[in-house]
Image (cartoon, rainbow, N blue to C red):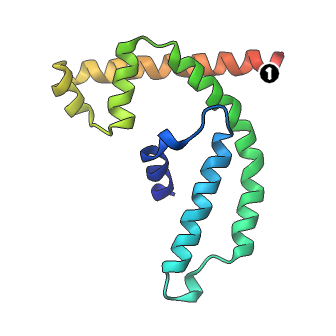
Amino acid sequence: MQETASWMWSHFDEYKPGTNFGAWGVQVARYKILKLNNQRANPRVRFNSDVVHLLDAEAEPVFEKISPRMQALEKCLSGLCERDRQLLFLRYEQGLTVKKMAQLMERPIQGIYKTMARVHKLLFRCVRQTVTIEEMN
């Protein structure tokens, strides 16, 4: 799971906006599992292909629900000011620690934490409101 998430972050520029993010993630996970199976020497530890297909089938409805949230998040992110987007970029795309961000931006660590909390809260509310409005239409 961690390898899949890490790969997706580092290759996010390959994701095509407007497509199903969840399906893309499941596809990446499927390839990671297949690669892991091929690398394992002990066949008793391998995932059975039926298990992989079952996971796909179970994951699909979950990701169908996530897709509207991802679209809402993209919309909400575009509404942030440049400074807040830069903060998120440094933290989540560059993977910087809050301490490194504070040094780079010449701001107190607590200030970065407070700003991040504010931005997270703002995004949460925006996504929730956007999804609710979309469901009503």
- Of 44 and 4, the residue lying toward us: 4
Going by the numbered disc 1, the residue's amino acid type is Glu
Q: Quadrant of residue 45?
A: bottom right
Q: Which residue is mark 1?
A: 135
**99 or 84, which lies in front?**
84
Left or right of residue 130: residue 102: left
Q: Residue at x 58, y 25 (%)?
A: 73
> Which residue is at 24% across, 28% downward?
101
Quadrant holding the C terminus:
top right
Residue extending farthest right: 137
Q: Residue at x 37, y 29 (%)?
A: 89
Q: Position of residue 95 (x, y in %)?
A: 32, 40
Mark 1 residue element:
helix
Q: 108 or 51, which lies in front?
A: 51
Count of marks overlaid on the render: 1
Image location (x, y in percent) of residue 7: 46, 52
Residue 15 horizontal/vertical position (percent)? 56, 41
Find residue 128 and report its image quarter. Answer: top right
Near-viewer residue (39 or 1)? 39
Q: Is residue 49 left or right of residue 9?
A: right
Q: Is residue 100 above or below residue 86?
A: below
Residue 22 vertical placement versus 108 (above, below): below
User: In the drawing, does residue 101 fall left or right of residue 54?
Assistant: left
State the image coordinates of residue 132 (x, y, percent, origin top left): 74, 19
